[in-house]
């Protein structure tokens, strides 16, 4: 398992970039707009991690800007922790065997979500290409929220 990023939702991209980049000294390493989903993702790394982060070899902060206004309140702006795993199916099976609920099963062979005992969302992402869809994951429904 490898730590990838922490996601936080932001309401004002410019103010957030001013804080994280100009004031804290982080650097933007990649950005993507998703018009269909109406959001922008901006990944920032510590200045000393810039080169490694460009190769996805250092952890980042993912700033998520949803284009439609939303009042997040305290706590809602924090999104999730993300970890890359060698085999998402084996990881989820091991977690289930340990009593962990798979809130968003890896139906696509790429992504799953679980929650910590304190309800912190944890995203699990398949290392490399997605695995071929397989049961029981393909038919498994979401449980709760993540």
Image: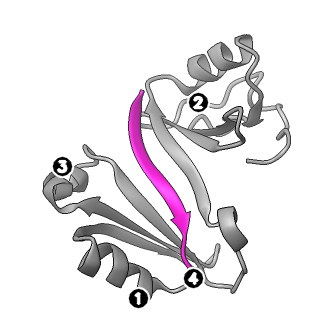
* Residue 129, position as x, y percentages in the image: 44, 37
* Residue 122, position as x, y percentages in the image: 60, 40
Mark 3 near mark 1, Cβ–Cβ under 8 Å? no
Per the model, the C-alpha gap separating discs 3 and 1 is: 25 Å
| Dot in front, 3 or 2 | 3
Per the model, the C-alpha gap separating discs 3 and 4 is: 28 Å
- Secondary structure predominantly adopted by residues drawn in magenta: strand
Depth check, front residue: 4 or 127: 4
88 in relation to 33, above or below = above
Q: Mark 2 points at which residue?
A: 132
Q: Name the quadrant containing residue 93.
A: top right
Per the model, the C-alpha gap separating discs 2 and 4 is: 36 Å
| Dot in front, 2 or 1 | 1
Magenta highlight range: 1-10
Mark 3 near mark 2, Cβ–Cβ under 8 Å? no
Of mark 2 and mark 1, the one earlier in the sequence is: 1
Residue for point 24% across, 69% down: 27
Q: Mark 1 points at which residue?
A: 14
Q: Name the residue under label 4.
A: 11
Of mark 3 and mark 4, the one earlier in the sequence is: 4
| Dot in front, 3 or 1 | 1
Depth check, front residue: 13 or 107: 13
Per the model, the C-alpha gap separating discs 1 and 4 is: 9 Å
Q: Mark 3 points at which residue?
A: 52
């Amino acid at each position: 398992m490898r730590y990838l990023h922490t996601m936080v939702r932001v309401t004002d991209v410019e103010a957030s970039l001013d804080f994280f980049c100009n004031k804290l000294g982080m650097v933007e390493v990649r950005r993507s707009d998703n018009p269909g989903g109406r959001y922008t993702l901006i990944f920032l790394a510590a200045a000393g991690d810039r080169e490694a982060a460009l190769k996805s070899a250092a952890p980042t902060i993912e700033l998520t800007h949803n284009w439609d206004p939303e009042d997040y309140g305290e706590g809602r702006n924090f999104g999730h922790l993300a970890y890359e795993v060698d085999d998402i199916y084996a990881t989820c099976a091991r977690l289930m065997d340990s009593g962990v609920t798979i809130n968003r099963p890896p139906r696509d062979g790429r992504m799953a979500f679980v929650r910590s005992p304190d309800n912190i969302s944890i995203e699990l992402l398949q290392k490399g290409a997605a695995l071929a869809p397989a049961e029981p994951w393909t038919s498994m429904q979401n449980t709760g929220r993540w």
